[in-house]
Amino acid sequence: MSRLTNLADRLLRWLLPRVAGKRKPDLTIGPLADPYLCRWYVLPRNRLFNVYLHQFWRSDDDRALHDHPWWSLSWCLRGTMVEHTIAPGGIHRRQRVRAGDVRLRTARAAHRLEVEHGAAPVYTLFITGPRLRAWGFHCPAAGWVPWQRFVAGTDDASRGLIGPGCGDEPVPDDPSNDWRKFSRKLTPWKERDHA
């Protein structure tokens, strides 16, 4: 067992009784009887950075990759999953993520996490920076779609339910469809793609 894997195991054994064992998740995505993700705030939420304990019960929606509104660091504490990304040239990459593995992502890095069906839940420590932009899904035909249009609804009752997803065609008059224009309004100058 590597030192990072051993440290991940020790951290999870410390966090579970102190965070997950003391209270219900701060956020549950999906139906309570069959959640996709449970999230506990390890530190009180703030505008600079956040630390979450994630418990993945199921895979991310497989219709499209998604990005995040902030840079993020994921440290897999227990379990195994597969991370799907798209490499330059449109090449689909699959990379196994095991306990002890660390992934650092920019806000624009699109990915999808796949948990093996029937496997024990996967635990990660998820650290984020300040909010830089809106987040959404990267659809093959429609391009970038804001999360509010992709999911079933934005209220707690519909959180995690299957929504319309990518749809069939892009909406030409919707500025959120062009993720570069839309994200420039929300992204600090240093983070912008100056192409």
Image: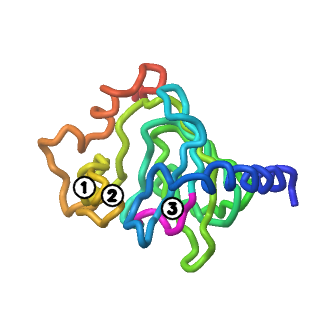
Tally of marks? 3
Task: Determine which of the numbered discs, if any, sits on residue 153 in the image.
Answer: 1
Does 87 sit left or right of 171 as displayed? right
Q: Amino acid at mark 1?
A: Gly
Q: Measured from the top left, where is residue 193 in percent x and y?
A: 43, 29
Residue drawn at point x = 22 percent, y = 61 percent: 167
Q: Residue furthest front?
A: 22
The mark that comes first in sequence, 3 or 1, is: 3
The answer to whether residue 138 shows anywhere in this view is: yes
Chain part drawn in magenta: 55-61
Task: Determine which of the numbered discs, if any, sits on residue 52 in the image.
Answer: none
Q: Measured from the top left, where is residue 64 in percent x and y?
A: 38, 60
Quadrant of the snapshot with the C terminus? top left
Residue drawn at point x = 84 percent, y = 55 percent: 6
Q: Nearer the viewer, mark 3 or mark 1?
A: 1
The mark that comes first in sequence, 2 or 3, is: 3
Is residue 70 depicted above or below 88 in this figure?
above
Q: Which quadrant would residue 5 be assigned to in this image?
A: bottom right
Q: Are marks 1 and 2 in contact (CB under 8 Å)?
A: yes
Task: Determine which of the numbered discs, if any, sits on residue 92 in the image.
Answer: 3
For label 2, count other residues whose C-alpha is less than 10 Å away and answer few (under 14), some (14-19) or many (20+).
Answer: some
User: Which is the main secondary structure of the residues drawn in magenta?
Assistant: loop
Q: Secondary structure at mark 1?
A: loop
The answer to whether residue 86 shows anywhere in this view is: no
Q: Give the residue pinned by disc 2.
A: 159
Q: Amino acid at mark 2?
A: Arg
Does 160 sit left or right of 43 as displayed? left
Q: Are marks 2 and 3 in contact (CB under 8 Å)?
A: no
The mark that comes first in sequence, 1 or 2, is: 1
CA gap between label 3 and label 1 equals 29 Å
Is residue 100 depicted above or below 134 in this figure?
below
CA gap between label 1 and label 2 equals 6 Å
